[in-house]
Image: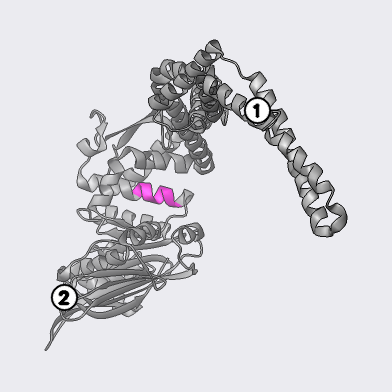
Amino acid sequence: MLVNLSIQNYALIDDVSVGFSKGFTTITGETGAGKSILLGGLSLVLGNRADLSSLKNTEQKCVIEAEFDISNYDLRSFFKKNDLDYEDVTILRREILPSGKSRAFINDSPVTLDVMRSLGDRLVDVHSQHQTLRLTENDFQMKVLDALGGNAELLLGYVGELSKLRKASKELKDLEDFQAEADKEHDYNTFLLKELQDAKLKEGMQEELEEEYEQLSNVEQIMEKLAASHQLLNDEQLGVVGRLGDLKREFQGLTDFGTDYKALSDRIQSVLIEMDDVASEIEQLKDGVEANPDRLETVNGQLQQLYDLQKKHHTDSVNELIQIRETLTEKVDVVANMEANILAKKSEVEKITQEVNGWAKKISDNRTKVIPKLKGMLQEQLALLGMPSASFSIEIDPSNSFKTNGKDELTFLFSANKGSNYGELKKVASGGELSRIMLVIKSILAEYENLPTMMFDEIDTGVSGEISNRMGEIMQQMGNSMQVFSITHLPQVASKGKYQFKVYKEEGEAGTSTHIKQLSTDERVRELAEMLGGKTLSESALAHAKELLQ
């Protein structure tokens, strides 16, 4: 609910601050007094764009503040989502600087214009010519049926399941796309994997094979060196082992002459043992070494296979080849298991689809049930607004695709005259007829939804007499449960307001300024009388004005 509106330095307004209450409020004033300026200022804090032409004094900034009581609007999630401080009484502020820059604030926190507009849409519904055109849109028409059908909870359930369905369907498509792409590479990957598996790769094998290859390819040189070494160690006359034995025996005779001799004797003994062991190992190696052309060829083949694989895969080691083998194994396995994964995902999609269809069916059934009721309410109310022959053809047909609000196709046709063919609202209804239809629909919605503040901008244009009286009664009735404003030039409508404000202009030395004030009962009588008969107040006009207020 709009509690207070403050406007500074906007259009013809110097400084205006006005408070509002719940119920039906009418705003009147002479043509050109600035009623549209007031609405234009409000639209800025609701997120509309502005420019320098909005400033009355181009050297000062324009500031517009709107204070709203939002305690009944369930908007805490909106404030949390946008990282804003929630207050039951929230202030929207808009500043337009002389430089042309614009700033927007919600509870003193700077916000983008999109965020302000999103909140504004939840707080005030401004009925204008553009908004009337929404009546011709299928989504809006469906919203009316859903309100009457009590589909709010069902739509939440439907939207939740639809979100799951879209997510699962995307995952299925991703799997199918991946499979299609993977199938192209599968045979080649399988071939590469078999090559690596046949190589029986393991860590350190390249070093082992290269060492064995060197030994096998140099076997004669190794045998020659081992034989020579064995000879040096074991020659009867000059062999190292024999000579060390002699040295040991000579030193044994010195061990009794001191610890130094004893220590050297022990060291000679250790060297003799070590050299004797070395001689034994050399003999074993010598006896074990033999030429093996077959094994040499095998080792050479294995090494060449490794070198070819490394070149093919642009690697330098067996470890890298092992990693490639593991990666290829995963790719081949994924493709091999992909069909099972796709079947499982298809089953999931089918199951969720059944759930979504279930929600959609309940929503559609409720819509179908309330169509006769909606047609009756529309036609009854429009008859009282001077459209006695207005009738509607409303039909629901199932579609094959899921929409954001169900699976229904809605046909919403209108005929203003008896015997006339039905047609789309935007094609067969005049502007005045659309305004009256929208007013009736909004009054119906007010009974079923917690609507935001409603602002009707001269919705009564083009009507008079009893019809305008009835339009005023409809807005008055809506005001029993919500806040409703009507900018009007008709006394019949103005008199129905619980409160009445007058917009007027004053000329001073600094120029012309627009003002707004709440009218007392006596002031309302005079204002209504002027609206009925002009500036010259007649007794009959005053009497008629009093009668309207009563």
| Occupied quadrant, residue 236 | top right
Residue type at mark 1?
His
Identify the residue at the far right of this view: 256
The residue indicated by pointer 2 is 535
Q: Position of residue 439 (x, y in %)?
A: 33, 50
Q: Is residue 15 left or right of residue 290?
A: left
- Which range of residues does the magenta coloring cover? 440-446
Identify the residue at the far top of this view: 294
Q: Is residue 537 magenta?
A: no
Q: Give the CA separation, mark 2 to mark 1.
A: 139 Å
The residue indicated by pointer 1 is 230
Res. 111 visible in picture: yes
- Quarter of the picture holding the N terminus: bottom left
Q: Is residue 355 left or right of residue 250?
A: left
Q: Is residue 173 left or right of residue 55?
A: right
Crowd class of label 2 (few under 14; some 14 to 19; many from 20; radius 10 Å) = few
- Quarter of the picture holding the C terminus: bottom left
Give the residue displayed 54% in from the left and 29% down from the top. Answer: 352
